[in-house]
Structures are given as structure tokens and as C-alpha cells.
């Protein structure tokens, strides 16, 4: 039962955090039930930083041609400044080929080639670079990589628009 004489400006709560669940889902809410007649529950929403992230979070490559390869890189870092090692890097769909991995002061720089399939004539190609963290069960940094593919344009397909040079001035009035 609610007792207004027991009101307090501060309450210390002991919380238990399930770190395994927090690694899977890094947002949520804490619900506190009260016996106050007008405020039965208090919700506290939170977002926890992931332990390991890529910088940038994704890679977007524009204007690639069918069969073209483009080189780029990402850096994997710890949000908490801890030392770590990475495992064998893989590509989900096989369009990414790692060319170099370099240890840096704050993580790992991963250089890779994004390869557009020769039979992909236009649209988008999406793949994920999967970077496992050694010693952390099921901890994988997934980097979304996508490329915009534009069709090959031959000389015959190019529109031939007249080229305008200079300006024309028309006189108005009587």
C-alpha cells in the first residue's frame, strides 16, 4: 500500500545484467513497478554500445560495371578500448575478397576487393564482410557492403545531343 511518509528522493537498485543477451540485443527497457496510486510503472529505455564495431558501419560503392572490382577498407575497433584479435574473415555471398589485414593502435584495418559478378548487368549487389572476434563466442562484426551496378554503355547507345555554345539575346519591345 502507498505510504506518502515513506517518500524518498533517491532509490538505489541492484540490477543484474545478462551480458549474453545484451550482446544479442543492445536496446531495451527496464520497468519498475511502484505502489504509487497515479504512477504504477516507471520505464527506463536504454541503448548499450556494442563491444566491437566497424568504421564506417557499412560500405557503399557507386557506378561499378559488371565484372568490375573496387578496392576499399574498414577498420574494426573496440568501443571499450580493450585489446582483441580477429578470426578468419569471410564473405557471406562470395563477392568480397580480403587483400590485407593490418593491426592498428585501436583495432584492425581490413582492406578488401568488392567484385561485381560479370552477369550482374544493373541494380545492386549486396554482401556482408563477417569478422569474428577471437575468444568471444558468437561475437561477429558484420559489415554491410553494397555496390550500385550500372549497365555497360556502348557508343551506339549514347544519345547524341547537339552541343550549345554561346548565348543568344533577343530584343524585346517596340
Image (spheres, helix red, strand yellow):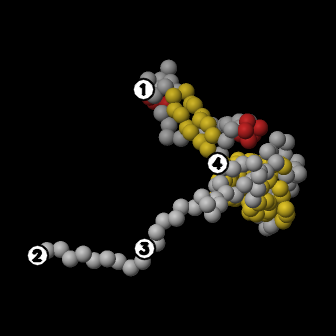
Q: Residue at x 31, y 77 (%)?
A: 168
Name the residue: 35% across, 77% down: 167
Q: Residues within 10 Å of mark 2 (few under 14, many from 20)?
A: few
**Element at badge 2?**
loop
Q: Nearer the viewer, mark 1 or mark 2?
A: 2
Residue that label 2 marks: 174
Callout 1 crowding tier (Cα within 10 Å): few <14, some 14–19, many ≥20:
few
User: In terms of depth relative to the viewer, which is nearer, 60 or 164?
Assistant: 164
Q: Mark 1 touching mark 3, by CB under 8 A?
A: no
Mark 3: which secondary structure?
A: loop
Q: Earlier in the sequence, mark 4 or mark 1?
A: 1
Location of residue 162 in the rendering, given as x and y in whole percent from the top left corner? 46, 69
Q: Is residue 52 visible?
A: no
In the rendered image of this protein, does residue 168 appear above or below residue 76? below
- Measured in 3D between alpha carbons, the distance from the residue under mark 1 to the one under mark 2, in whole angstroms, is 81 Å
Does residue 156 sit above or below 7 in this rendering? below
- Graded by Cα atoms within 10 Å as few (under 14), some (14 to 19) or many (20 or more), the crowding at tag 4 reads few
Q: Residue furthest front?
A: 156
Secondary structure beneath dot 4 equals strand
In-image side of 21 versus 40 (left or right): right
Horizontal arrangement in the rendering, residue 5 relative to residue 97 (left or right): left
Circle on res. 38: 1
Amino acid at each position: 500500500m502507498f505510504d506518502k511518509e515513506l517518500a524518498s528522493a533517491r532509490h538505489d537498485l541492484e540490477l543484474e545484467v545478462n551480458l549474453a543477451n545484451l550482446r544479442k540485443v543492445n536496446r531495451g527497457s527496464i520497468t519498475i513497478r511502484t505502489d504509487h496510486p497515479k504512477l504504477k510503472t516507471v520505464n527506463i529505455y536504454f541503448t548499450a554500445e556494442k563491444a566491437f564495431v566497424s568504421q564506417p558501419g557499412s560500405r557503399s560503392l557507386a557506378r561499378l560495371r559488371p565484372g568490375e572490382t573496387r578496392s576499399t577498407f574498414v577498420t574494426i575497433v573496440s568501443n571499450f578500448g580493450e585489446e582483441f584479435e580477429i578470426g578468419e574473415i569471410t564473405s557471406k555471398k562470395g563477392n568480397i575478397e580480403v587483400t590485407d589485414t593490418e593491426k592498428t593502435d585501436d583495432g584492425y584495418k581490413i582492406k578488401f576487393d568488392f567484385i561485381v559478378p560479370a552477369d550482374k548487368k544493373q541494380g545492386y549487389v549486396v554482401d556482408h564482410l563477417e569478422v569474428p572476434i577471437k575468444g568471444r563466442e558468437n561475437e561477429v562484426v558484420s559489415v554491410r557492403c553494397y555496390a550500385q551496378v550500372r549497365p555497360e554503355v556502348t557508343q551506339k547507345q549514347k544519345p547524341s545531343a547537339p552541343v550549345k555554345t554561346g548565348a543568344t539575346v533577343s530584343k524585346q519591345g517596340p
